[in-house]
Amino acid sequence: MPNAPAPRFFAARRAVRRFVGRTWLSVFGWRVDGITELPSKAVIIAAPHTSNWDFPFTLAVSYVLDLEFSWLGKHTLFEPPFGFFFKWLGGVPVDRRDRNNLVAAVVDVLKERDELILVIAPEGTRSRTKRWKTGFYYVALGAGVPILLGYLDFPRKRGGILHVFHPTGDIEADMAAIRHHYDGIEGKHPERMSEITLGARGAPANGVVQHP
């Protein structure tokens, strides 16, 4: 039975993560609401992003949902001696020197993996911006995966996944639908919330350049 310890290890790890997540949320009076049946491959957006507090609450919600997510990082971040550590944290290396092909590179990463939930922040900053960056949309569309609409609603103390959204290629209509799902959701600092509108064509999108 040489492989028996591995399943027990991962089951114990998931149990510890759920306990940590539930404890954190309970201390602050938060609950996880929304969809719990999630696909094995997707792009997840976490919005609104207005505070450093978003990260620990996002982690806690993901632990409760038993959601393992990954994030994009500059390829040099994964070189020795700390590269293994960042990969262990869920980092996926991408080469940002060739920005015109970055969407294609991220699409290839998603297509190569059997399971990958990739976090891309549509706002890209905690400060208020005029529009969402749309790299997340073109990555999901190119890879043929859904977009998980993650959220943190600080006034209601709720977090989770609002909807599993399948992009159609009509970005104007799709962004309008996504905006509708976020109606009434407020971040910790509502005055910093960005408008859910389209970014400029060809502009950098969270380090990801969208298709022309």
Image: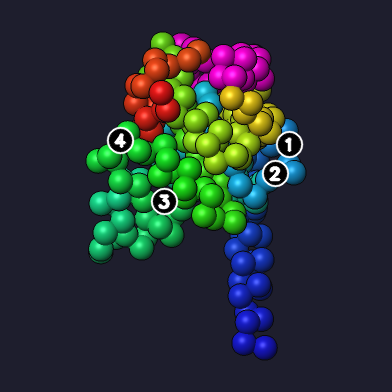
The residue under the point 31% across, 56% down is 78
Q: Which mark is residue 38?
A: 2
Q: Which residue is mark 4?
A: 99
Three-letter code for the amino acid on which mark 4 is drawn: Arg
- Above or below: residue 201 compared with residue 96: above
Q: Are marks 1 and 4 in contact (CB under 8 Å)?
A: no
Measured Cα–Cα span from mark 2 to mark 3? 21 Å
Instruction: Count residues near mark 4 (Cα–Cα under 10 Å), then give few for <14, some for 14-19, many for 20+.
Output: some
Label 3 neighbour load within 10 Å: few <14, some 14-19, many 20+: some
Mark number for residue 35? 1
Which residue occupies the foreground of this view, 169 or 197? 169
Identify which residue, 150 or 134, lies in the foreground: 134
Q: Is residue 171 magenta?
A: yes
List the residue tagged with mark 3: 92
Q: Earlier along the polypeptide chain: callout 3 or callout 4? A: 3
How far, Cα to Cα, is label 1 from label 4? 34 Å
- For the residues labelled 3 and 4, the Cα–Cα distance comes to 16 Å
Q: Which mark is residue 95?
A: none
Task: Please identify the quarter of the rendering in which residue 28 is found.
Answer: top right
* Relative horizontal placement of residue 49, taking residue 8 as reference (left or right): left
- Is residue 155 in view from this perspective? no
